Each structure stands twice: as C-alpha cells, then as structure tokens.
Amino acid sequence: MSKSAFRLALEAAVDERHCADHPMWDMLAAGDLGRDACRGWAVEHYHWISNMLTEATFQICSKAPADVIELELANFHEEEDPDEPHMEIVLQFAEANGADLDVVRRGEGLPTTRSWAAWLKQVARAEPWYCGVAAIRIGTESQSPRLYSSVLPSLRENYKFDEKAIQHFWLHSEVDIEHSNRGFEVLDRHCTTPEMKEAAIHFARESARMRWFYFDGIFLHYEKGYSLQ
C-alpha cells in the first residue's frame, strides 16, 4: 500500500534528526566507539524507559480512543513481559560492557536522559493523545529498525558480542517495525484536520530532536569524558 502524505511528512520530520545519523552511532557502526560509551548507552536507555514508560503510556490512555488504548496497552505489556522484560534485555548489553547492574538500578541517568524522559511525560500529560503517540511511537520508536540494524554487523564482527548480549538490537530492529506501523496507522485514522496533523508532525520532529540531544549527552559523558553528572 502507498503511504499517505501525512505519514511521509511524519517520517521526514523524524529523518531531520534520526539518531542513526548521530556521530556516536557512526562510531559504533565502524567499531570505533569505546566500551564505556557502549555501556553508557545501555545504562541511559534503561533509565529513560524506566523513568518514562508507565506514566506516559497511561496518560495517553486516559484520553485516547479505544483502538489507541489497545495499542498502547499491547506495547506496554510487551515491554513489561514477565517472562522476558525488555529492560532486562537492555541490561544484558550493559553487563556485557562491564556494568554493575545493582549500581545501574540505583542510579537515575544523566541530566540529558532525565530531560528527555520528563519532556515525553509532559507531552503525554498536557497535550492531546495524538501528540503523545507522535512523540513516542513516531519520534522515537519508528527510529529503531534503521537505528539498530545499522550497527548489528559491527556488534557481531568488530565487538564480538554474543547474541544474548545484543538481543535488544536484533529484537527491536524487528518488532518496532510493527509497533511504529501501528502508530502511523492510528494517527492516519484519527488525525482528520490540518491542525491535528500539524501538531503530530511537530511533536514527532521535536521528539527526534530530543533523542538526538540525549545521544549527545551519552557521547559527551561516556566517550569524550565530559562529566555531566
């Protein structure tokens, strides 16, 4: 099926600051990123999700149509799957790079990480539901297939990680195709006015920019040695 002009505009807004193009990710794809930054990426991803996911999900659900609530809850339950919680999968990569997981769990993340999580929660709380979906499902989650697939060869060949350590990358390069497609579909279905579409595009773009800023924090702190804590 051909994509709508609205979906193409959402995708273009994200591509303006897609994190697959970030210098840190270029270094990871080339095998040049240090293990401190590899560990730091996983640690900060853990703190971002754990600080944001529950509140943002249920704030969106509190004002969304039934089909959107179903989407949000399905994604939430998958992330929190008791048999294979996705946060523990992220921590596998942190541990493979030398992280003490007890210390990680007691932490709170860099200021840039906390800023991005707080921004997403604010959008989910204060804006219409479709802005929250655009920020989380489009501005962030739709990046995963290109983001993670671009570094998988390097993680296997240059860094020699086993498949368990890099499960987050190969898992989300696949499952987030469906997740983001469902996000695009509900926005296509419900954003019926130019004003709604313009708002969704704006928050998709801003979320991608905030994620880029969050990558800046990881890169500066863990790779370049600037102390941001």
Image (cartoon, grey):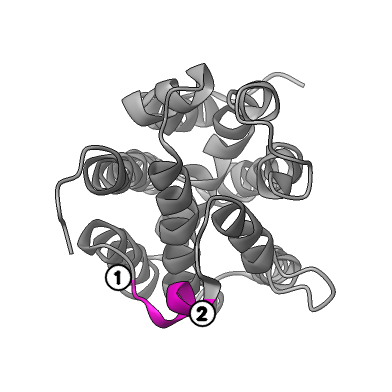
Q: Quadrant of residue 82?
A: bottom right
- Would residue 218 be counted in the magenta stretch? no
Q: What residue is at 70 percent from the left and 63 percent from the top?
A: 71
Tell me the quarter of the image containing the N terminus.
Answer: top right
Q: Nearer the viewer, residue 12 or 96?
A: 96
Q: Quadrant of residue 73?
A: bottom right
Q: What residue is at 40 percent from the left and 52 percent from the top?
A: 40
| SS at badge 2 | helix
Give the extent of the magenta segment: 102-108
Q: Quadrant of residue 12?
A: top left
Q: Estimate the x, y position of residue 183 in percent, counting from the top left.
A: 61, 48
Does residue 24 appear left or right of residue 42 in this picture?
A: left
Q: Nearer the viewer, residue 20 or 202?
A: 20
**In this figure, which residue is indicated by the disc labeled 2?**
102
Q: Which one is in front in this view, the residue at disc 1 or the one at disc 2? A: 2
Does residue 220 appear left or right of residue 75 in this picture?
A: left
Q: Residues within 10 Å of mark 2 (few under 14, many from 20)?
A: few
Q: Estimate the x, y position of residue 79 in percent, counting from the top left.
A: 68, 66
Q: Amino acid at mark 1?
A: Gln
Tell me the quarter of the image containing the C terminus.
Answer: bottom left
Q: What residue is at 52 percent from the left and 81 percent from the top?
A: 62
Give the main secondary structure, helix, strand or loop, of the magenta stretch: helix
Q: CA distance from mark 1 to mark 2?
A: 29 Å
**In this figure, which residue is indicated by the disc labeled 1?**
122
Which of the two labelled residues, at mark 1 and mark 2, occupies the earlier sequence position? Answer: 2
